[in-house]
Image (tube, rainbow, N blue to C red):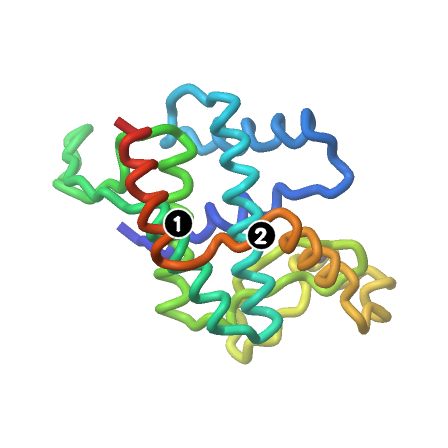
C-alpha cells in the first residue's frame, strides 16, 4: 500500500473550498467528494459534512503555515490531526488478492477520510519535506498542491493558473493572505497534545 498516495485526499479536500459558495453548495461538493471516493462507502450524515468542513480548515492551516515558513506550527498542526484521527490498520485479503493493509475500515465516512488524509500527508511530508507544500500564487486562486518538481519551483496549482495574465502581477499573493485569514477564523487554536488526546478518546467512542 502506498500511504503517500493518501495525501491526495488531503489536497482534494482542501481544494473543495470555495469562498463564493454558500453552505448548501459546499455540502453538495463535499458529499460528491465522499461519494466519488467509493472505497469510503457508507452513509454520509449531515454531521459528517460539518466535520469535513472543519477538517478542511485544519488541513489548509497546515499548508498556510508551511508556505509562510512556520515549520513548527505546520508540524504541530499535522501532529495534532494525527492524534485526533488515529489510524487503525487491518490486514485484508478480499477478492482473491494477497493479504494487504487497509486503513480504518470502521467509523464514520468522515472519520475514515480524516485518518487517511492526515496519514497520507504526514507520510508525504516525511518522505519529501514540508517545503513541498504549496498554495497557488495566481490571483484569486486558493488551491493547494504538493510540489513534485526537481528544484521545488512550482508556483501555481495548474497550467491554467500559470498561464493566466493576472498571475504574473500577483506579487503579494492575495489568495494566500485571504486563505490565512480564513483559517484564523475557522481554526481558533486547534493545537496542543492535551487537547488532541481528549478528542481522540471522543472520536473512538463515537466511531464504535
Ligand atoms: Zn491556481
Q: Nearer the viewer, residue 81 or 39?
A: 81
Can residue 61 be seen here? The reply is yes
Question: Could you tell which of marks 1 and 2 lies nearer the N-terminus?
Answer: 1
Give how far across and how far down residue 139 sits, in percent: 80, 59
Give how far across and how far down residue 67 sits, in percent: 60, 69
Can residue 119 be seen here? The reply is no
- Residue 35: give its label: none
- The residue lying at 41 percent from left, 52 percent from top is 81
- The residue singled out by tag 2 in the image is 188
- Say which quarter of the image contains residue 161: bottom right
Asked if residue 27 is positioned above or below residue 131 in the image, the reply reads above
Q: Mark 2 vs ligand 1: CB under 8 Å?
A: no
- The residue singled out by tag 1 in the image is 6
Q: CA distance from mark 1 to mark 2?
A: 26 Å
- The residue lying at 18 percent from left, 30 percent from top is 94
Asked if residue 102 is positioned above or below residue 72 in the image, the reply reads above
79 left or right of 74? left
* Mark 1: few/some/many CA within 10 Å (<14, 14-19, 20+): many
- The residue lying at 50 percent from left, 35 percent from top is 51
- Label 1 sits on a secondary structure element that is helix
Q: Quadrant of ligand 1?
A: bottom right
Amino acid at each position: 500500500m502506498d500511504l503517500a498516495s493518501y495525501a491526495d485526499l488531503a489536497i482534494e479536500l482542501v481544494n473543495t473550498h470555495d469562498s463564493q459558495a454558500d453552505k448548501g453548495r459546499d455540502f453538495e461538493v463535499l458529499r460528491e467528494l465522499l461519494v466519488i471516493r467509493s472505497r469510503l462507502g457508507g452513509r454520509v450524515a449531515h454531521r459528517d459534512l460539518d466535520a469535513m468542513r472543519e477538517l478542511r480548515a485544519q488541513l489548509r492551516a497546515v499548508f498556510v503555515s508551511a508556505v509562510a515558513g512556520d515549520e513548527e506550527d505546520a508540524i504541530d498542526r499535522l501532529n495534532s490531526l494525527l492524534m485526533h484521527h488515529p489510524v487503525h490498520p487491518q490486514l485484508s485479503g478480499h477478492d482473491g488478492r494477497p493479504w494487504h493493509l487497509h486503513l480504518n475500515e470502521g467509523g464514520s465516512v468522515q472519520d475514515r477520510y480524516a485518518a487517511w488524509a492526515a496519514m497520507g500527508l504526514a507520510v508525504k511530508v516525511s518522505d519529501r519535506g514540508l517545503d513541498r507544500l504549496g498554495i497557488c500564487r495566481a490571483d484569486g486562486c486558493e488551491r493547494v498542491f504538493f510540489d513534485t518538481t526537481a528544484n521545488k519551483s512550482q508556483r501555481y496549482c495548474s497550467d491554467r493558473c500559470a498561464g493566466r495574465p493576472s498571475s504574473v502581477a500577483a506579487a503579494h499573493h492575495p489568495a494566500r493572505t485571504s486563505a490565512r485569514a480564513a483559517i484564523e477564523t475557522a481554526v481558533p487554536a486547534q493545537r496542543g497534545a492535551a487537547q488532541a488526546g481528549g478528542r481522540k478518546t471522543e472520536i473512538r467512542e463515537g466511531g464504535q
